Structures are given as C-alpha cells and as structure tokens.
Image (cartoon, grey):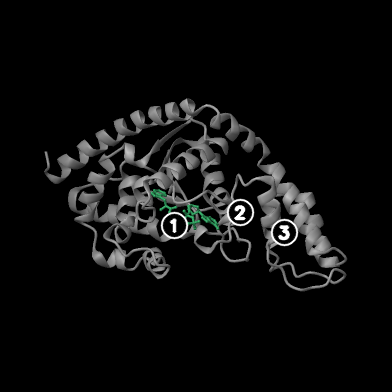
Amino acid sequence: MRILSGIQPSGILHWGNYFGMMQPAIRLQEQGEAFYFIADYHALTSIRDPAVLREYTHGVALDFLACGLDPAKTCFFLQSSVPAVAELAWILSTLTPMGLLERCHSYKDKVARNLPATHGLFSYPVLMAADILLYDSDLVPVGKDQKQHLEVVRDIAIKFNERYGIIFKLPEPSIPEATETVPGLDGAKMSKSYANTVEIFATEKVLRKKIMGIQTDSTPVHAPKPIGSSTILMLYKLFANPVDYEQMRADHRRGGVGYGDFKKRLFEAAWLFFEPMRNRRNELLADPEQVNQILKEGTVRANTIAQSVMERVRFAIGLK
Ligand code: ADP
Ligand code: TRP
C-alpha cells in the first residue's frame, strides 16, 4: 500500500497540524510505503517573500523529522523537487470541470480571508490531484478540512480514467475521527489564520503563556465546570494518559478546582509529550547536512516513480 501526504510550509507548525495530520501520517509509516512531502508550490499561493518561504520550508522539514518521520521507511522530499507534478497538474486541468473547483469551500474561505484570488489558489486542488496521482497513492492521511479536496482529486482521476482508460488509482482519504478538529486557544478550530495556535516547538515561556491564555468561562473555582465546552479538557485529552484525563474530567464535574490549575496540568503534559521530539529537533538543527541528505535521497526516489507514471500518462493521452 502506498501512503502519501503533503503539508504546506505556510507557517510554523502547530498542535492542529501535529494531531490532525502529522501524528496519523507518522503512525501509518509502519503500514506501507510512505511518501511525505513539503508542499512548497502550494505555499506560493500565500507566501510571497522568498526568505520567509525558505525559512518555513526548513522549519517544516525539521519539525516533521523531529516528530518521527523516519527517512529509512519514508520518502521525504520537497514538492518542487519533482517538477513533473506541475506538468501533470496542467494535463489534469484540461479535464477538470470549472464547476468542480467553483464548489470548493477552501477557495472561497481563503478569498474571504483576503488571500489574493489568483488562478493558483483557484486551481489548488488540481495540483493536489497531481501530487497524489503522480505516485499511484492508495491512502492519503489529512485533516478533515482536506476532505473535499480529496473528493475533487477522486473526481478528476475518474474523469481521466473514463476518457483514457485505467491510468490512475483512486486514492482514499484517511481522517482519524478523534483528532479531526483540534481546538485552538479560543475554542474555534486551531488554525494559523485565526491567530489561536500553539506551536509544537514553542519555547517553555511562550507555551506557558499561551496555555494560560486559553479562553474560559467565568465559573467560580468552587463550582462544577462544563465538560462539553472545555477547550482545556479537549486539548488535555491529546496529551494525557487515560487515568490523568479521567481525573481532570472528574475534577471538572465536582468543582473545587480552578481553570488555572487545569491549565497548569495541560502545560506539564504538553511540555513532557514533546520533550523527546524537542531533543531530536535540536540534534537536527545542529546538523543541517543530515536534513539536506534526507531530502536529496527522497528527491531521487520520488522522481524515479514520477517519471514512470508520467511515461504512462504521456503515452495514454498522445503526447508520445
Ligand atoms: P492551518 O489551518 O493552520 O492553515 P493547514 O491548512 O496548513 O493549517 O493544515 C495542514 C494540515 O494540518 C492539514 O492536513 C489540516 O487538515 C491539518 N490541520 C490543521 N489544523 C488542524 C486542526 N485544528 N485540527 C485538525 N487538523 C488540522
Ligand atoms: N492541501 C494540503 C493542506 O493544505 C497540503 C497538500 C498539498 C496535500 N498536496 C497534498 C495533502 C497532497 C495531501 C496530499 O494541508
């Protein structure tokens, strides 16, 4: 089974990215042949400063490796190191109905948030289709917000196969239910666009400050706290062992413990959870050549597969 996913270097990675996409992708490495890439072509739809793009790209490479992407098992590369993906995106775009893209929420949301309404942003899912189909992918681990894009990818593959014969596999999304929407500091979906994120590798001081700033209601210390709407409890569940989690739930129900206390517990659990990854990240930071070498090896392997799929595609459509 081939597993593939990508993440845009459009910011500093946060808990939503980790639990929604990276952790499931890292777990899946054990179950098949994994291909994970940094979607730098996609990031051009929002990042226009070359120095910033380079910095974020390097950051994502470090973060993903530190969090457990294992280069011995997984092919790790930059999207733009395999330029065939842009060729395939063009080919797919000639078959993609406008209506399919016009329906995408993500485009409308991004334009509503003032991202420039460019052709690249509009055709974003076509490039995603190329990413996925170029490697004959079976399974695509993503967060829930990518579900519609995956449906578009499948529709494009079906259209292509109907016209030219069975050339592409139909990929399945993999969206773990428990972490499909990680809440941010304000209780809404954690997202860099909402300024409510907690970065995976925030310093101790920043982490403490952010956690202490989680929005809570005004229930007094002695009173029971609502469970369903507690952002602290939802986040704690991601980090704590089941016994500690049940304890916090019980303390919510009973009352007598203030939100400040719950926040301290959340801080301790989160800080401890990422400790081994922080150590690994510091090692990688001190050895940039290692990261370059991993991406270089990934690039060679990814290009080999991409080339063989492109031969099949070019022949099927009459470019050869
Ligand atoms: P952001 O919303 O911060 O811009 P991206 O859109 O770049 O994040 O998301 C990258 C990956 O992380 C996607 O697979 C996305 O579904 C996942 N992801 C992002 N935020 C969350 C969240 N709050 N909960 C679950 N998954 C998330
Ligand atoms: N669009 C995805 C996101 O914003 C990133 C991405 C690009 C991707 N190409 C992909 C994810 C291919 C899975 C497969 O998070």
**Residue at image x 31%, y 51%?**
127
Which tag, 2 or 3, sits closer to the chain's start?
Answer: 2
Q: Nearer the viewer, residue 111 or 208?
A: 208
Residue 66 appears in view: yes
**Residue at image x 68%, y 59%?**
234
Amino acid on which disc 2 is placed: Val
Residue under pointer 3 = 212
Which tag, 1 or 2, sits closer to the chain's start?
Answer: 1
In the image, residue 219 sits, relative to residue 41, either above or below, namely below
* Residue 189 locus on image (x, y percent): 56, 63
Q: CA distance from mark 3 to mark 1?
A: 30 Å
Which tag, 3 or 1, sits closer to the chain's start?
Answer: 1
Residue 245 appears in view: no
Taking 210 as reference, is 147 left or right?
A: left
* Residue 158 locus on image (x, y percent): 28, 54
Kindly indicate the quadrant of the structure image that contains residue 118.
Answer: bottom left
Q: Nearer the viewer, residue 96 or 136?
A: 96
Kindly indicate the quadrant of the structure image that contains residue 76.
Answer: top left
In the image, residue 253 sits, relative to residue 93, either above or below, namely below
Q: Are marks 2 and 3 in contact (CB under 8 Å)?
A: no
Mark 2 C-beta to ligand 1 under 8 Å: no
In the image, residue 277 sits, relative to residue 247, either above or below, namely above
Mark 3 C-beta to ligand 1 under 8 Å: no
Task: State the SS at label 3.
Answer: helix
Amino acid on which disc 3 is placed: Met
Mark 1 C-beta to ligand 1 under 8 Å: yes
Residue under pointer 1 = 146
Q: CA distance from mark 1 to mark 2?
A: 21 Å
